[in-house]
Image (cartoon, rainbow, N blue to C red):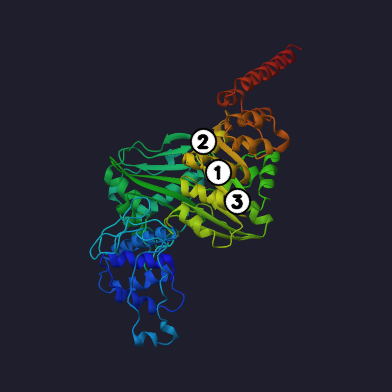
Amino acid sequence: MLLDVQWFIYALISNGALSPEDAVAIYNSLGEEVTLETYAQALLEQMAAGYSEEELPTLLEQIQEVVNYAVAQGETGECPPLELPEPSAEEAAAPAAAVPRQNFPPPRRSGAVPPPRRNAGAPPRRGGTSARPPQASPDAGDDDEPVRKKGSKRAGLVMDTPRTFADLDIDFSAINGFEDLPSLSDTAYLDDSALEERMIYLLSCLRHLGCSDLHISAGSPPFVRRQLIIERIDSYVLTSEDAERLNLCLLSPERKAFFVKEQDTSFSLEVGSNRFRVCLMYQKDGISGSYRLVPDHICSLEELGFMDRDAATIKRLLDYNNGLILVTGPIGAGKTTTLAAMVNVANEKREDHVITVEEPIEILQMSKKCSVTQREIGKHTISYHSALKAALREDPDIIVVGEMHDLETIENAITAAETGHLVIGTLHTGDAANTLNRLLDVFPPSQQAQIRAMTAGSLRGIICQKQIPNGMGGIELVYEILINSQAVANLVSEGKTYQLKATMAIGSKLGMFTMDQLIMDKFNAGLITYEAALERMQDSESIAQMERMHAMEEAKKLAAGKK
């Protein structure tokens, strides 16, 4: 019998939720291949008969908590001090469909956990959280394989009824500015159907006007972000009721119930061929919603603003069969579109299995030469680290992690990169050196040396990017690239990340450079004005060089004018 199954049964018997005789009967009824998931599913189906439809989600959460505990305890390698009755003569003589229970292996260490007691709490889970049987009231867990009854949602997930909205027939030639948009001041007088149409109309028009985000927030006028600048589109201050109706009108019943319970949610919205990333939350005045307008196609690296030579460098990084590539930058830097462009490059030039984990899925990837599997946090899986752990069992070649923000996700990503997978992930950091510090500093001091050595060996490169005003009424992508050379690997393993910028500045032959160097190159190419470039540069030597170059150009212009 598998260890996690033993711990699952032990927790239930300890809490009085299951008798030893019933535990044996369920196990014997499942045949030879009894996993924790099949055992928990059989128990759930047996118990569900006594629960109402409203009580079932709570039952799912409670069984999930015991599953989480069993998985954690099973990973320790210890066996529970559990004694079950031997099968009866009838059970022993049963046909192959009801295979007699396998014997438990003896405990490897006595006294590892307290003895089972009727009506006592379940043994503590590693990390201090107590697992409770289905009659307790725990929070839903977030481990890898939640129990799932066919046709019902898994604990911690929301199973959305798919909602797609058709494009409206809009004459965009009549939409030249925000003054051409309808006011939201009549929200209270619109029925639900008219309100849906109003939101779809608004989102479609804002895409036409070049906006990247729409914000609908209680206690504030509606506003957008365009060319990185916040602009109001209406002077009407939304009431709490207006904001609630506007932000909830496009949600499915399941998503609405999930949001009310969890107080925030993130999901993708599909309107015809257009997609939007929606994030909702409660705040002091009511509900706030932000709507990110996702590009309507997968942009190439060159379209996003990468110079030809740098796009070629990134494509070379995607030729590796293993290792870690990081795309970093602040929120709104365009990491998602860069990630999608990189997946598309691999999809067109390699023949591999690609698994992406995103929150939510923004840009759809169709399988071309690669087989692409996209999973969404909150819909297909509970968390990044559980999805990454599960991905390793799905025979992937490339794993894309939408956000690496906790120790377990980062640890799993580095391990996957070391064990033969190409892992592409994102972090919210401002430059390459800070990226590595952020990556390594989440680990406790006792693991620092080991993780630095692992990262030095598995890292392939870092693309750190941001978007800035170009001084000509538009925005420009600026970035820096670090390539893991022998010199970089030595600095990482020795903890001397503060020297990385100097190494990058002299590593142009390998395709790496600093942000300041790239800004200067874009200025020379006429993509950024002198004022915009100077405002974003940080290194004093680079600033001085830029000022000298500008002074020389102005002197040449002055001399040419005199002639």
Cα distance in 3D space between marks 3 and 2: 40 Å
- Name which quarter of the figure residue 371 lies in: bottom right
Where is residue 255? Give x, y as percent.
36, 57
Say above or below: 474 vs 411.
above
Residue matched to label 2: 227
Amino acid identity at mark 1: Gln
Look at the numbered disc 1 and give the secondary structure of its residue.
Answer: helix
Marks 2 and 3: in contact by CB < 8 Å?
Answer: no
> How many neighbours does mark 2 have within 10 angstroms: few (below 14), some (14-19), or many (20 or more)?
some
Where is residue 335? Give x, y as percent.
54, 43
Marks 1 and 2: in contact by CB < 8 Å?
Answer: no
- Name which quarter of the figure residue 101 lies in: bottom left
- Name which quarter of the figure residue 197 lies in: bottom left
- Closest to the camera, between mark 1 and mark 3, is 1
Amino acid identity at mark 2: Gln
Q: Earlier in the sequence, mark 3 or mark 2?
A: 2
Image quarter of the C terminus: top right
* Residue ranking furthest to the right: 563
> How many neighbours does mark 3 have within 10 angstroms: few (below 14), some (14-19), or many (20 or more)?
some
Name the residue located 65 percent from the left edge and 21 percent from the top edge: 546
